[in-house]
Amino acid sequence: MRILSYLSPGFPRSLFECLAEIVDAEVDFDEELSGPAPGHDPFATGAADLGWICSTSFVDLATRGEQPTVTLTGVAWVPDDPDANGRPVYFGDVVTRADSGITSFDDLAGRTVGCNDPVSLSGYHSMRFALDDRGLDESFTSLVFTGGHHQSLDLVLSGELDAAVIDSVVRTGRARLDPAVEELQIIERLGPWPVQPLVARATLDTEQIDRVRELLLEAADRPEIQAELHAASLSKLVEVGPDHYADVRRAMDRAGSFLDR
């Protein structure tokens, strides 16, 4: 089998390589976006059997047309974050420098805010949804795509951006290694939102999908897997069902999917 990961370099490549080895699969990386670009579907063509993608991409691919091209494998990770409270959820952390003068979401008016990419939930759509919830649109602030969470953090630190919305797991991991990132102020945590799922192409044999889930959950307590999870600011792997992503679908229905952008 072939796994395609869209979540590096935000998450370490070694994590996906280790997980791929457990299920006897090859892993490739696409670092352009957080999921398949609109109009491109490697699961429909059979180019990928499994994929780590953003949940916005999962909802899109699972609801596009009469024949969804992906389904859940039923396994997800839990962030090493007290606010996750042991659940497979994470946040879009809105961060800024202490000297920016920004202390609340309202202070983002007219400011330049960095976003990951047009597919990312934590790094873009969480901001869209937050604006929609407040009766605002993207004219409220200037949203700039940087191409990655680490790039967004770097641009905030350099002063080229006033703020940025960052995957909370990526921010946590970077802050543990980078004192400058640790000092950034989190003015709001958008969410919680369901973490990025591992999906399977819909035409993959059900028994294979079940076996992938079983292998990953059984291996989750191995020392080498725990080490990889810890290095990525994650704590464990758990089983999830389709209803776990219902909030993302509802938000996309309300505010529009990225295909409408």
Image (cartoon, helix red, strand yellow):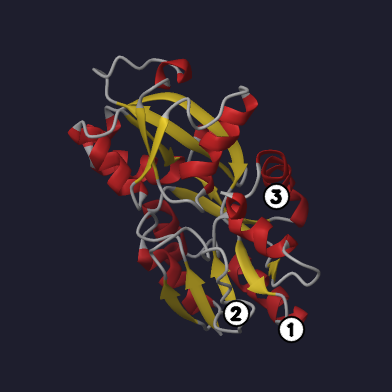
Asked if labels 1 and 2 touch by Cβ distance under 8 angstroms, the answer is no
Asked whether, in this view, residue 155 is left or right of residue 88, the answer is: left
Give the CA distance from mark 2 to mark 3.
20 Å
Q: How many marks?
A: 3
- Label 1 and label 3: CA atoms lie apart by 22 Å
- The label number, if any, that marks residue 49 in the structure image: 2
Identity of the amino acid at label 2?
Asp
The spot of residue 214 in percent (x, y) is: 67, 71
Q: Earlier in the sequence, mark 1 or mark 3?
A: 1
Of residue 189 and residue 174, the one placed in the foreground of this image is 189
Going by the numbered disc 3, the residue's amino acid type is Tyr
Which mark is drawn over residue 1?
Answer: none
Kindly identify the residue that appears in the image at 63 percent across and 67 percent down: 199
Place residue 71 in its image quadrant.
bottom right
Dot placed on the residue nearer the N-terminal end, 2 or 3 = 2
**Amino acid carrying mark 1 in the image:** Asp
Q: Which residue is mark 3?
A: 245
Query: Is residue 56 toward the left or the right of residue 158 in the image?
Result: right
Determine crowd level at label 3: few under 14, some 14-19, many 20+ residues with C-alpha closer than 10 A: some
Residue that label 1 marks: 205
Secondary element at tag 3: helix
Q: Secondary structure at mark 2?
A: loop
Residue name at image x 39 percent, y 61 percent = 8
Count residues near mark 1 (Cα–Cα under 10 Å), then give few for <14, some for 14-19, many for 20+.
Answer: few
Which of the pair 98/87 is nearer the observer?
A: 98
Q: Quadrant of residue 165?
A: top left
Percent x, y of residue 158: 18, 35
- Decide which of 57, 15 is in the foreground and name it: 57
Q: Is residue 207 left or right of residue 82?
A: right
